[in-house]
Amino acid sequence: MPKDHEIARVIAMHPADNVAIVANDLGLEAGAQVPDGPMLRERVPQGHKVALTDIPRGAPVRRYNVIIGHAAEDLPAGSWVNEMRLDMPSAPGFEGLPMATAKVDPGPPVTGKSFEGYRNADGRVGTRNLLAVSTTVQCVSGVVEHAVARIRAEILPRFPNVDGVVALEHVYGCGVAIDAPGAEIPIRTLRNIALNPNFGGRSMVVSLGCEKLQPDRLMPPGTLSDLDTVRLQDNAGYEQMIRALMESAEEHLAELDQRRREVCPASDLVLGVQCGGSDAFSGVTANPALGQAADLLVRAGGTVMFSENTEVRDGIDQLTARAATPEVAQAIIEQLAWYDAYLARGGADRAANTTPGNKAGGLSNIVEKAMGSIVKSGTGPISGVVAPGERATTKGLLFAATPASDFICGTLQLAAGATVHVFTTGRGTPYSLEAMPVLKVSTRSELARRWHDLIDIDAGPVALGEATIEEMGALMLDTILATASGRATKAERLGLRNALALFNPAPIT
């Protein structure tokens, strides 16, 4: 009886596909026999594609029943199909797209789902109780870093109902042409992050004093009191700056310490979903299961945001068809067209998205990557679009139009109002944010075993037939609700956190 790793296991996503990916941990050697398929002509690594039939030069290569490229050479059945043997198709146009034509039945409402969150005065609900220290300019970051360290060590222990202190540091400075086109994006991003429900709807703001982005321009009118704002130039030296920051923090912590978790319906949850360090299994295991969880949460009345402009661009027809209304479909087109123009100004296009790690994990190009990325949005209608830096104002499934960069996407979803985040990965990344809990999901069990202290959920059993997409999606939703109720992610237990990253398309003078 052959050992498990000697049994050829391949996964095709659709009956019309002419390629399948290798599921075996160690890949497959030349001569391995694909069940009901060809014999491998050469070694094919795990996650990479094998031709199931003869594919002549110039013929389409299909995965997900989508043309992910054309054969750059003759590819006999059993050949390794990789990025060097594919010519990538052009991006779909913006004309003649289906506009809100897919009348998808989302399924019956999901009832009985809840979590324990912190309800704010405006009705929004947080998953953590955090003091946010926002900043108007990068110049103050060093002082804020010192002050926050002392606040955590000397003051925070006296307020046990507060989960932590978060410094919302960034690299925005006075070099930015603050009134140029696009300059409003980082400003509204910082504003809406400071108002995230995880911060109780109120933050401290630290200003230098002479910067272009003054506190009253950063925050909405009437939202800042004298207690909320500390101007470093108003103080007589470093020690007085630190003292002023600590005094303001103590007042804020005393207020936050009065908050208590209460049972809230799942409809109050705002979930951000993202993938990074993706591989060919992303669209097979973790992302479809996350899409199932997204469907369940939306059916429970909650909000789910998916993003990553370049990683959905090649499936724009899928998105516009799923739009709830023609107006939503048009908003999707406008955001993706704007981003195409933004990339073109920099002499780049969507092809620059795929990384060496993506390709090593079996993703040949951005078309293939996009098909695996979109599925984490689930199958339901898209009810709204959130522009970069804006705050979501509707419920349901939303397209938050962000760059695909892990850190920029997470930052913009935080600004849009996400209070918990799910991040799927195939290659592995320790990515985490301090301002909201980040659950990490592995696409493969091998990664979950290697990174046992970093991965929260292993979706690998789906590839082995040991769990269904539906079972894994239900597990994800239960884990999301438990995390929203205060259960720490593995990254939170380790104290891992990445810095925020602003998207700033404006020029710097």
Image (spheres, grey):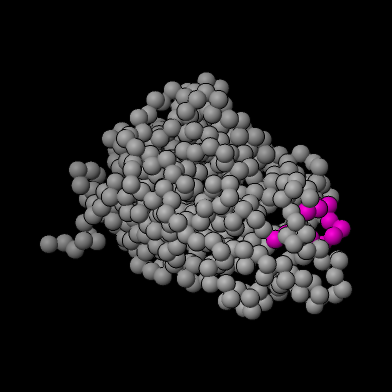
Q: Residue at x 32, y 50 (%)?
A: 474
Residue 12's image quarter?
Answer: top left
Q: Residue at x 49, y 67 (%)?
A: 492
Relative to 455, is 207 on the left or the right? right
Q: Is residue 105 rendered magenta in the image?
A: no
Q: Residue at x 39, y 51 (%)?
A: 114
Q: Quadrant of the N terminus?
A: bottom left
Q: In the image, is residue 244 above or below residue 191?
A: below
Expressed as whole percent of the image width and height from the top left, the position of residue 419 reads 52, 53
Q: In the rendered picture of this protein, how many numbered marks are placed on residues? A: 0
**Residue stretch rendered in magenta on the structure:** 204-215
Expressed as whole percent of the image width and height from the top left, the position of residue 267 reads 44, 44
Residue 440, visible in the rendered structure: no
Q: In the image, is residue 51 above or below residue 496?
A: above
27 vs 104, nearest the viewer: 104
Q: Residue at x 28, y 50 (%)?
A: 471
